[in-house]
Image (cartoon, rainbow, N blue to C red):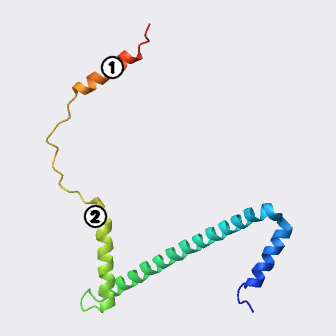
Amino acid sequence: MFDGIGFLELLLIGVLGLVVLGPERLPVAVRSITGWIRAMKKMANSVKDELEQELKIEQLHTDLKKAESQGLKNLAPELQDSIDQLKQAAQSVNRPYQVEDVPAATETPAKDTPTAKTSTTENAKSDKPNG
């Protein structure tokens, strides 16, 4: 019953659009409709991705609860994989916040460099009108 739109249906829609909108407005209408379709597909894909991520997180939580109830010993391989994934996720989240020992800079920047003095005096000279 609903097999999709075939070539003849697309041709009929195109002819009707040409008759109703005219040759000047039809390309603009087609572009705006395709833009709407792209936006709806993008939004649907983003919702789908978020739902998949939430389901994965929920599955990891249930696996972690099962592992805790078993005392984190003699776990099934899928539970151990879930725990390993959680550990990797926790490490990747903590990594940017870890403080590393950064050696202090040995050189201090000079306050007045000759090039800076020269450039400011040249700028001051060039600002004065020649009169």
Q: Is residue 129 left or right of residue 80?
A: right
Q: What's the amino acid at mark 2?
A: Arg
Farthest front residue? 23
The answer to whether residue 112 is visible is no
Q: What's the amino acid at mark 1?
A: Glu
- Seen at 20% across and 35% down, the residue is 109
Q: Is residue 13 left or right of residue 83?
A: right
Q: Which residue is mark 1?
A: 122
The label number, if any, that marks residue 95 in the structure image: 2
Crowdedness near tag 1: few (<14), some (14–19) or many (≥20) residues, C-alpha within 10 Å: few
Farthest left residue? 106
Quadrant showing the N terminus = bottom right
- Quarter of the image for residue 57 reads bottom left
- Seen at 33% across and 77% down, the residue is 86
Gap between marks 2 and 1 measured at Cα: 49 Å
Q: Which of these two is toward me, 7 or 111?
A: 7
- Quarter of the image for residue 65 reads bottom left
Give coordinates of residue 41: x percent, y percent. Answer: 60, 73
Give coordinates of residue 99: x percent, y percent. Answer: 23, 57
- Seen at 17% across and 36% down, the residue is 108
- Quick one: SS at disc 2? helix
- Seen at 83% across and 64% down, the residue is 22
Give coordinates of residue 33: x percent, y percent. Answer: 70, 68
